[in-house]
Amino acid sequence: MAETTLDARGLKCPMPIIQARKRLDALPPGEVLAVVATDPGSVLDFQGWMKTSANFELLGQEESKDEQGRRTFIHRLRRKS
Amino acid sequence: MNLKTDESLERLVRAQVDREVAALKESQPEHRVTLVVFSGELDRNLAALVIATGAAAMGMKVSIFYTFWGLSALKKRRIFKGKSLKERMFALMTPKGLSKMPVSKMNFGGAGRAMLKKMMSENQVSSIEDLFALAREMGVKLIACTMSMDVMGITADELVDGVSLGGVATFLGDAARSKVSLFI
């Protein structure tokens, strides 16, 4: 499955959500967007958004570390239709 | 009961159900947020714009009603000509735009604002000017309260382009259909 990555590292609220929305709008339905963020608040933010959204779904979230050793949060989102 | 009355009864019931479902849908709140911005302070306006842009990104329709001190957020310039003395004083004493707003605590004659702006940029938080531009780009509806414009002597020429003018019913019309309404 095709997957696009959005680098949202260093971005603060509300920018990860706004950038993600812009990218999702440009993707064809069914394609997955992986948002890589450093904001720990983004975990509940993406959950909150997907709870209220009919068009997008949250496939999963995971924690990782980037090459600079920063704590990152990867959110996988999919446009349903 | 014959077949014919059965059919007409079914039609009647269906029409009634359709009407009630339509009425129920009409009374449901929309995916909509309505904010009142009463405050003319930078930090409170920052909070309002973060909520507005976040909601717009989540696909919600957003309206912001600017009233009283909040109107300063919409100002693009000050006009003194043609105003009464009291109106000119108001124009002089209120901030000319978002960038010039004081912070609600520890402003210290503008030093606090400068420090907050610096700390925001050091932390890569979007500036209030960027968020305002973003809100407009994302289709957030901006409404200026005409009653408070009159009271404070603010004219439509002093406000940024694309602002609608309205009153309490404009706000309530949007707020009544909203899932979220806030007074800031």
Image (cartoon, coloured by chain):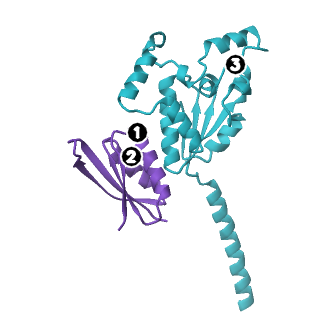
Chain colours: A purple, B cyan
- In this view of the protein, can residue B2 be seen by the observer? no
> On the image, which quarter does residue B123 sit in?
top left
Disc 1 and disc 3: Cα gap in Å? 34 Å
Judged from this view, the residue extending furthest toward the front is A67
* The disc label shown at residue A57, or none: none
B156 on left or right of B59 = right
In the depicted structure, whether residue A1 falls above or below residue B91: below
Q: Secondary structure at mark 2?
A: helix
Disc 2 and disc 3: Cα gap in Å? 39 Å
Percent of width and height locating residue B64: 60, 36
Q: Secondary structure at mark 1?
A: loop
Judged from this view, the residue extending furthest toward the right is B82
Is label 2 in contact with label 1 (beta carbons under 8 Å)?
A: yes
Camera-nearest label, 1 or 3: 1
The chain that hosts pointer 1 is A
Q: Amino acid at mark 2?
A: Asp
Q: Secondary structure at mark 3?
A: helix
Q: Quadrant of the N terminus of chain B?
A: bottom right
The chain that hosts pointer 3 is B
Give the residue number, with chain letter if any, for mark 3: B152
> On the image, which quarter does residue B126 sit in?
top left
Instruction: First in sequence, mark 2 or 1: give its number.
Output: 1
In the depicted structure, whether residue B46 falls above or below residue B154: below
Q: Amino acid at mark 1?
A: Cys
Give the residue number, with chain letter if any, for mark 1: A13
Give the residue number, with chain letter if any, for mark 2: A45
Percent of width and height locating residue B15: 70, 72
Of the pair B60 and B172, the residue shown nearer to us: B60
Q: Amino acid at mark 3?
A: Met
Classify 10 Å Cα crowding around label 2: few (below 14), some (14-19), many (20 and above): some
A19 on left or right of B10 = left
Do the residues at discs 2 and 1 belong to one chain? yes
